[in-house]
């Protein structure tokens, strides 16, 4: 149980870093940790009139690849379904959307690299 709590804290820390980074890069943050029956969207934001649905992946090391490498077909499918749920529940029809990924990869306990991939995949 403690390992899951530690992972969750680490993930939450990554999401806070991502929110700060996105705001510094012109994103307006609409929601964090949006949950629905289809899954969770880490961050929902807008940039230049486009609704952005953002997955955040934080890694301690790159021994198993970088954070963005963890976005597999199953994760994309859940993110797309959750996005459709969000849009439908708010009657947001015919809006421009995109899926972005923020990868936070630690190189040491205090040093990390952030990579923002805009329009990382399509739905």
Image: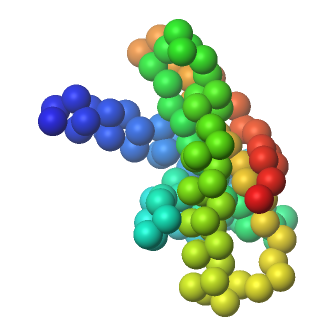
Looking at the picture, does residue 101 appear above or below residue 51?
above
Q: Residue 112: in sight, yes or no?
A: no
Image location of residue 60, percent across then percent down: 45, 19
At a point 52% along the width and 19% down the height, the residue shown is 106
At a point 48% along the width and 38% down the height, the residue shown is 14
Looking at the picture, does residue 104 appear above or below residue 9?
above
What number of labels is visible?
Answer: 0
Looking at the picture, does residue 94 appear above or below residue 107?
below
Image location of residue 19, percent across then percent down: 56, 50
Give left or right: position of 120 versus 75: right
Quarter of the figure that contains the C terminus: bottom right
Image location of residue 66, percent across then percent down: 61, 22
Looking at the picture, does residue 72 appear above or below residue 95?
above
Give left or right: position of 19 versus 118: left
Image location of residue 111, percent across then percent down: 52, 17
Residue in front for this viewpoint, 12 or 36 = 36
Give left or right: position of 64 versus 93: left
Quarter of the figure that contains the N terminus: top left
At a point 83% along the width and 82% down the height, the residue shown is 94
Residue in front for this viewpoint, 54 or 64 = 64
Residue in front for this viewpoint, 9 or 92 = 92
Can you tell which quarter of the image residue 85 is in? bottom right
**Colouring scheme applied when the structure was drawn:** rainbow
């Amino acid at each position: 149980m403690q390992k899951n709590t530690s992972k969750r804290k680490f993930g939450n820390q990554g999401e806070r870093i991502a929110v700060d980074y996105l705001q510094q890069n012109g994103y307006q943050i609409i929601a964090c940790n949006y949950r629905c029956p289809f899954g969770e969207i880490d961050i929902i934001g807008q940039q230049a009139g486009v609704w952005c649905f953002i997955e955040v992946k934080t890694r301690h090391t790159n021994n198993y690849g970088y954070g963005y490498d963890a976005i597999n077909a199953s994760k994309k499918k859940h993110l797309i379904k959750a996005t459709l749920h969000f849009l439908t529940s708010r009657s947001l029809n015919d809006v421009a959307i995109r899926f972005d990924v923020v990868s936070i990869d630690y190189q040491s306990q205090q040093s990390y690299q952030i990579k923002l991939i805009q329009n990382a995949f399509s739905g």
